[in-house]
Image (cartoon, rainbow, N blue to C red):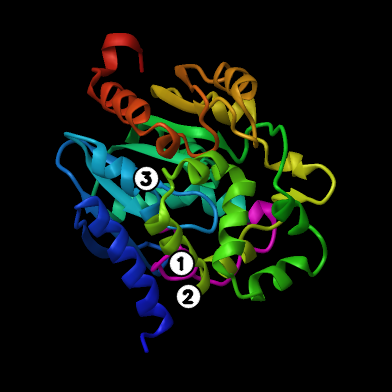
Amino acid sequence: MATPHQQHLDAEARLWKSLGVQPKEYRITLATGGEVRVQELGEGPPLVFIHGGSISGTSWCQLAKRLEGIRCFLIDRPGCGLSDPIVGGPLNDLPELEAYADGLLEQLLDALELEEATVAGTSYGGFFAFRGAAQIPERVTKLIEYSWLIGAPPEGAPLAARMSGLPGMRELMVRMPMSRGMVKGALKQFGLGSAIDSGKFNEQMLDWAHALLRHTDTLANDTRSSPKLFTPIKGQNDDVLLSDELLAKLTMPVLFLWGENDPNGGAAIGRDFSARLPNAELVIVPGAEHAPWIDDLETCASHTERFLAEPLSSRFER
């Protein structure tokens, strides 16, 4: 019988095979220690992807395969997928999490030997992308956010996220073996309902997500290092919100590809949040939820390619 680790790898390999792609895989070492797994595909200007909560870089597989003329780096954040856990153990409070998020992107670019790059994020990955880019704006040529991100005002919060704010509940949740049905239900809660129901988040992707959450420590590591992001009553903790002072540092061109029906924060939130940045463009993806690149791959891919191809001086001023 295959080991749990191998069961995850086998499910991931089947997913990539279904797309007809075999990414190059390697590991990089962060300055603070610990190895990070990278999957790379494509040729062209670099685009570094930072995934959302309790998932891995493979979540971008459909978009990375579709993009043309772009060198895609799919990162497994520390503690997720096949990357090492965060050195020093779980993060214990919000100031510790914010300090870690502020420095992670610079470490990734250094380890990838990229002097500068476009950075893409979604959900929890957007929190890392925005906070990191605010620290090194001279190295982030452009920034792309796919739908709502932690740090933007929310419209709601999934029940599972609220429950994680209850004393003792986080440990109970991460110790519970995840069945395929539980994974499917959780993904729907977090905003992939239409993608699953339409078959765009297909059986191979569901098999991979189940194997990731059942046979790796991704869920436990990411949950334990995400302190006080959500509260049982209010949902997202207001202390996590990105300040106008921080957003003002993001002077590079920023593209939002925002799901119109993202249950975490839909089109109205996207309009208000993007207007707070000095150099932002907002594209509302009709009918899309929390993973717009899965709900509407062609719209997200074409806008991503167009945005990366534009000279910095053509529509924006640095």
Q: Residue at x 21, y 37 (%)?
A: 70
Q: Secondary structure at mark 1?
A: helix
Mark 1–mark 2 CB contact (< 8 Å): yes
Q: Secondary structure at mark 2?
A: helix
Q: Nearer the viewer, residue 265 or 133?
A: 265
Q: Quadrant of the N terminus?
A: bottom left
- Which contiguous range is marked in magenta? 76-96
Can you give x and y, in whole percent of width and height, for residue 131 in the image?
A: 52, 40
**On the image, numbered disc 3 is attached to which residue?**
49
Q: Residue at x 61, y 75 (%)?
A: 177
Can you give x and y, in whole percent of width and height, for residue 200 in the image?
A: 41, 43
Residue 215 has which mark? 2
Mark 3–mark 2 CB contact (< 8 Å): no
Residue 212 has which mark? 1
Residue 137 has which mark? none
Can you give x and y, in whole percent of width and height, for residue 83 in the image?
A: 40, 67
Q: Which badge, 3 or 1, comes first in the chain's sequence? A: 3
Q: Is residue 280 left or right of residue 161?
A: left
Q: CA distance from mark 3 to mark 2?
A: 23 Å
Task: Name which residue type carries label 2.
Answer: His
Q: Residues within 10 Å of mark 3 (few under 14, many from 20)?
A: many
Q: Name the mark nearer the viewer: 3 or 1.
A: 1
